[in-house]
Each structure stands twice: as C-alpha cells, then as structure tokens.
Amino acid sequence: MQTKDFLLELGTEEMPPKLLKNLSQSLTNNLINILQKLNLTHSNVESFATPRRLAVLIKDLQLQQEDKIIELKGPAVNSPKKAIEGFTRSLGINKSDLIEKIFKDANYYYFVKKQQGLNIVDLIEDIVKKAIKGISQQKSMSWGNGDFNFIRPVKWLITMLGDELVKTNIMGLTSNNITRGLRFSKQPEFKIDNAKDYQKIIFDKAKIEVDFNARKQIIYDKIIEIAAKNKVKAMIDDALLDEVCSLVEFPNVFLGKFDIRFLKIPKEVLISVMQLHQKYFHVVDDKGQLLPFFIAVANIDSNDTSIIKKGNERVITPRFNDAEFFWKKDKLIALADRVKELDKVLFIQSLGSIGDKTKRIELLSKYIANILSLNSNDVSRSALLAKADLVSEMVVEFPDLQGIIGYYYALNDSEKPSVAIAIKEHYCPKFSGDLIPSTKEGMVVAIADKIDTITGIYCIGKEPSGSKDPYALRRAALGIVRIIIEAKLEINIKDLISKSISLYKFDTNITNKIYNFFIERLDAYYKDKGIDNKIFLAVLKVYPESFYDFHLRIIALNEFIQNNSAKNLIIINKRIANILKKCDNLEAKINNDILVEKSEKALFDASLSIANDNSFKASDYSNRIDKLLSLEILIDDFFNNVMVNVEDKELKNSRLSLLNQVRKLFLSVADISYLA
C-alpha cells in the first residue's frame, strides 16, 4: 500500500484569537472523520495554527482506496418476471449478469460487482471542502464575487502530497506550494518543498513556530526569562497566554512601565486594562504587590524593541488616565445614593428593573439571615448596595469589575468591611472551581441574588431546555448548591423557592418544578465528586429539603458501603421493603406482649432502644448508621427463626409493624434498598 504525507494549509486574514484553537481542532477532526468514512488509513496527524493560518499534516496517508466487492440483493428467483426485469433495468444490466444465492432458506437474485478504489488525488478537493464547511463558525464572512464564506477571508491555499502539489480550487483559490511569513518581512513568501518539512521550513525561513502549543511554550519561557532578568514576578494567566499566542506568529517579549501614580487606582482596574484591553501580563513583587510594569508580546521581528516599548507605554497611559478620572469622579457619589438610579436599568423583560431586583434581594436576604440567626441589618445593607456600582462610570467602562468596584466604593463610603466584602463576593462562585463567598453576609446575598434570577426566569417560562441556558441558570443553581453545602448552611430549599416566587407576585405554583431543577444540579454536583448514583437516589428517596442535610446523608452512606456488613443490610432492607410493599395501616406502636419468639423480642428491644436514643435523633448520620449496623445479627436471627405470615392476624400485624419500625430507622438516613 502506497502512502504519502498530506499537507493542507489555509492562509487567511487574522482570525479571532479566542476562536483559533477551536477552529484548528475542528478542521483537524473533520479531516480525520472524512478519511475514516472513505476507508483511507494514515498514521499521526499534526495540527498547526497561527493568527493567519490553519494547517494539518497527515502522515502516511493511503494513496488509493482498496477495491471492494458490492453485492446488491434483488427479488426472489420465483418472483414475477416484471419484478426481475425492473431490478435489472434499474441497474442497466441483463438477467444473465445476475447470480443466485440463498437468503433465509430461499433463492434470490444478486448482482455482484467489483468497485475499484479511488485515487486520493481525485478525492482531496472534495475532502478539504467538506472539512472546511464542517467547521462550526459563530460568524462567517463573505468576500469577492463567490458564494463561499469563512471566519475570515482566505488568501492562500496549499494542498500537497509529499513533494508534489495537488491542484485544487477551493473558495476561489487555486492551490500552490507558496506560503507566507510575517508581513513587511524581507521574505514575505516562500516555497514548501515537501509536506513533511512544513513546520521546519516555516521556522527556518520566517522564524514562525506554527505549532500552537510549542509557540505558547516559547512565549511562556520568554516571559519568565524577562521577569527574572528584571527581578519581578510575572502573573501568567493561562487563558490570556492562549489569547496572546493566537495573536502573534513571531513573539517578541519586552517589559514596559507606567506612571507609579496609577497604583492609587484599585489594582483590579489596572489589571483589567492590561489584560482585557492591552493583552499585557501584570507583574508583582515578592510580596504579591502590583508593580508599575507590564510584560507585552509584540508580533514583529526586531532587534530593537525600544520603539515598540515606548509605543505600548504611550497607548496604556490614556487608558489609565480614563480609569483614574472615573475613579475620582465616582467617589464623589455614595453607593447608597446610586441605588435609586437602578430603577432605570432593566433586569429582564417582564421582570422589572435592577432596582426591583434589589428590593427582592433585600427581602430574601433578611429572610435567609433570620433562618441562619445572622445580623439582618448588615445583611440587608449588603443586599441594598450589592448592585449599586452597576450605574458607576467605572463599571460601565469595565463591566467585568462589577462587585469589585462596589467593594472599593463601599470602603470609601465608610461602610462596614463585612458589607463591602459581601458586595464584592455576592457574584461568586462565577465559574466552575471558583471560590464561594468568604463571609456569611456574602453567602446570603449571593444565594438571594441567584434564587431571585432562577425563580423569575421560571415564572416567565424561559427556563433552560436541552443544551440551551441563555440566562446561565444551571450555573446559578450549582452556585447555590455549593454555597449551602460547603458553608454548611441549614436552609430549606423548597421554602426558599416559595418565598422567592411570592415576591414576584406571579399567579403560579412552580415550586416543585424549580426544586426538581435544583435536584438535577445536585445530582451533577455529586457525579463530579465521583459519588455512586445509587447513593444519591437512596438519599433522594427520603426527600431531605436541606441540601446540607442531604450532603451529610450522602457522606454517611458513602462510608457505610465500605463496611463489611453493608451488603447484607442492603439485601435485608430490600427484603423488608418487598414484604411491606402491600401492607397498609401498620400499627405505629407495637404491643411487645404479642411477640412470642426470643429473636423478635430481641429485635424489638434493640430497635426501640435506638429509636429512643437522643444521639440517634441528631443529624450525625454516621453515628446513626453505626447504631443500625448493630441490628444486623438481630435482623438475621429474626428472619431465620420467625415466620411473618402466620394465621394469627394480630401476631402477623405485630411482626409486620416491627419490620416497619426497623425500616423507618434505616429510612431516617436513606432508603438503602436502592443500593441493592
């Protein structure tokens, strides 16, 4: 079987940096899938991506499809003549071209032919077109007079097999073996002699590393090197590093500086300007304090970076000047005086303004604070001011800093530190793995804010469906789940949902619907923790309405299944559940005098002792399970020595009631029969 390395390079205008990795991976996956469907083998596949190119190198690509035998089943041999003639006519053949084969004990006509495999050269154009068309693009562009489109206009195209050019015409371009280096370089265009040398040729000729991860590592190493040289510590955010890598082909790293006076502005503002607007890496000292320097990556080949450095320093100064102006101006108005302006800001259509939302959050926060025995005045103040910074000029300019700016303005207004921290943290957790609020006030306002959004969206019928979740309700619900569990808060979630719905004054009863939505998030939470779904279902069956209480039961049950006696007790519980399935109106109290067997009296005494034990009634579910484990031998003895379904109706009911009492003890933790 003959093979050659196949190279595809698609040269474009600069592509959106945040999409580059996905575009590259999508193109590669599409090519692999298409080749697989065509039964064309290959070995390693390498993806390459820079701001101006997507490339894929497929090693040892099979040059010719294997020949294959095609069998087409026709009518039965004894079918009417017209049916047989219709089959041959549809294939353009004669009856003499058919053969007879047995199928399910009957003779049928078959047409068998050998189909010759196609040459890869004849397939490449169609393969590449399909691979490009299959790329998921949020927004695409059209250019020229053609009907083609792509994320950015395509400027050049290479399709090669080994050292040979494969002629293709794609998106108005005829392929060749000419690629491009940096703009304005001494050698802006050069030839690729062989597909296998693609990466090396581009690096040797243009000093461009086309491998995304390799280029990312080069940038990282250069940042670390320049930081060490200047005795500072670079704060390298991986997402920003990806974005910078997607912006440059020839990374030229340098250290710039800004006026020290700007350090009087909150560091988050400066970092936001540097990261989001300028794509700079900020630097700190050995104590973690922000320094008046930044590390930038230019996309230019130059031995003298002084001009580039000065240009970047000139650009960042007016941005910091703007931030300084907003900072000084905003502080002239207290956060409390901004609250009334929230009435002019829409929350969501049909759900009122942010001012309306603030009023609801305040009432919900008081409600939760009373449940948790917190200072409702501090919580209420935190809720009132939580959204006030949304109408500040700083947040209008830097929306990602909402809450953080409110924190600084609250401190400027001499609000309590706990109130300021709650304002900053009430958006947390913002993403998977983010920290929950650090203060009780922050937790309460965060829960109130998120539950208000969830119930409001459900009230207007715009809840998540399938993969669509435009209001990020799943993330909000998971945030509430995490806060309650990780902060060990005893809150009845159903009561909280009902309270939140009541504040909207909608005539709707969707508490259970929203509760089930939360249960789905809770299930996802435990799946991420590696908890067996049977354990989750066992606890769910007893319907605890406090997520922290739910969590304690999960932990206890997870420990229980590690015990040697667990398997037997699970089987016993399943047996008891089956026995009691058709029993109604079992006696709540058991007359011990009716019980006659020694083993049933022993089980009665032991179960009653556990039920009356105050320590068993506490929410220490591990302790409950330890006590229940002591019943194993007694329950075994009961089933070995006692007949439940006896003719004496009173005795039978007493024994059933005893089993019901034992089952209730286990149900006080979970329905462990679900673990069977």
Image (cartoon, rainbow, N blue to C red):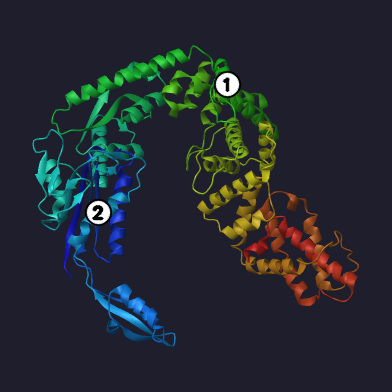
| Helix, strand or loop status at disc 1 | helix
Structural crowding at the residue carrying mark 2, measured as other residues with C-alpha within 10 Å and reported as few (<14), some (14–19) or many (≥20): some
User: Image check: 341 left or right of 322?
Assistant: right
Q: Is residue 374 something that shows in the picture? A: no
From this view, report whether residue 526 is shown above or below residue 393. Answer: below
Q: Amino acid at mark 2?
A: Val
The residue drawn where x is 75% and y is 62% is 663
What x and y, as percent, mark residue 649?
Answer: 89, 72
From this view, report whether residue 667 is shown above or below residue 263. Answer: below
Q: Which residue is mark 1?
A: 343
Task: Work out which residue is located at the far front of the displayed protein and give it.
Answer: 82
From this view, report whether residue 34 is shown above or below residue 418. Answer: below
Is 534 or 71 nearer to us in this picture?
Answer: 71
User: Image check: 278 left or right of 510?
Assistant: left
Q: Amino acid at mark 1?
A: Asp
Please tell me which of labels 2 and 1 falls first in the chain: 2
The residue drawn where x is 84% and y is 62% is 586
What x and y, as percent, mark residue 280?
Answer: 30, 30
- Indicate which disc residue 322 carries: none
From this view, report whether residue 235 is shown above or below residue 469. Answer: above
Q: Quadrant of the C terminus?
A: bottom right
What x and y, as percent, mark residue 268?
Answer: 41, 26
Quadrant of res 375:
top right
| Helix, strand or loop status at disc 2 | helix
What x and y, as percent, mark residue 211?
Answer: 23, 47
Q: Which residue is mark 2?
A: 128
Q: Nearer the viewer, mark 2 or mark 1?
A: 2
User: Image check: 409 left or right of 618?
Assistant: left
The residue drawn where x is 14% and y is 28% is 304
Q: Is residue 583 something that shows in the picture? A: yes
Quadrant of res 219:
top left
